[in-house]
Amino acid sequence: MLPVLAGVLLDVTPDALTVVTTDRYRLALATVPVRAFSGRPVGVVVPAVFAARIPVADAVEVTLDGGRIVVRAGAEELAGPLVPDAFPDYRRLLPDAPGAVPVDAGFRAALAAAPTHPMRRDDGASSTSPCSCRARTASRSGTATGWR
């Protein structure tokens, strides 16, 4: 895996902080308003383990100093290194206008015609999926969960 994909992008502008992450196949992002801003807009990548440790608070202060980041939330302070690689340009993957993404009739028909295979989850529940592959993911507790 590319090192930058094990990171989380913090894209900071005077109006918003956008948090972006990807696993090469899926993209997740969230945006929160910025209350105060100084400096120029910047996008930095932090290790995912660092991002997971950022305290939840009403107000969080983020300071960048060279290759390091410091996050303060109330009395808590968290400091760590930045990932030196550039994050993929996620904006070009997003539709120009918010709302529904158009899907043409041919694509809908191909999805409807795709073969499905019954699958059994590890907990015994069953489902139908157009995929016959075996996929497993690790949960936060370190145990494996997923589909067979």
Image (cartoon, rainbow, N blue to C red):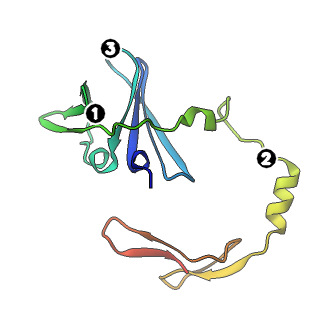
Tell me where residue 71 appears, x and y as whole percent. 22, 33
Kindly state the secondary structure of the residue where label 2 is placed. Answer: loop
Q: Amino acid at mark 1?
A: Asp
- Residue at point 27%, 46% (across, down): 50
Comes first in the chain, label 1 or label 2? 1
Kindly state the secondary structure of the residue where label 1 is placed. Answer: loop
Q: Quadrant of the C terminus?
A: bottom right
Q: Between marks 3 and 2, how big is the CA–CA gap? A: 41 Å
Determine the image quadrant of residue 102.
Answer: top right
Determine the image quadrant of residue 62.
Answer: top left
Q: Amino acid at mark 3?
A: Gly
Q: Amino acid at mark 2?
A: Val
* Residue 68, placed above or below residue 141: above
- Residue at point 35%, 75% (across, down): 143
> What label sits on residue 39 in the rendered view?
3
Q: Between marks 3 and 1, how big is the CA–CA gap? A: 22 Å
Residue receiving disc 2:
103
* Residue 13, placed above or below residue 74: above
Residue receiving disc 1:
58
Q: Between marks 1 and 2, how big is the CA–CA gap? A: 39 Å
* Residue 123, placed above or below residue 28: below
Comes first in the chain, label 3 or label 2? 3
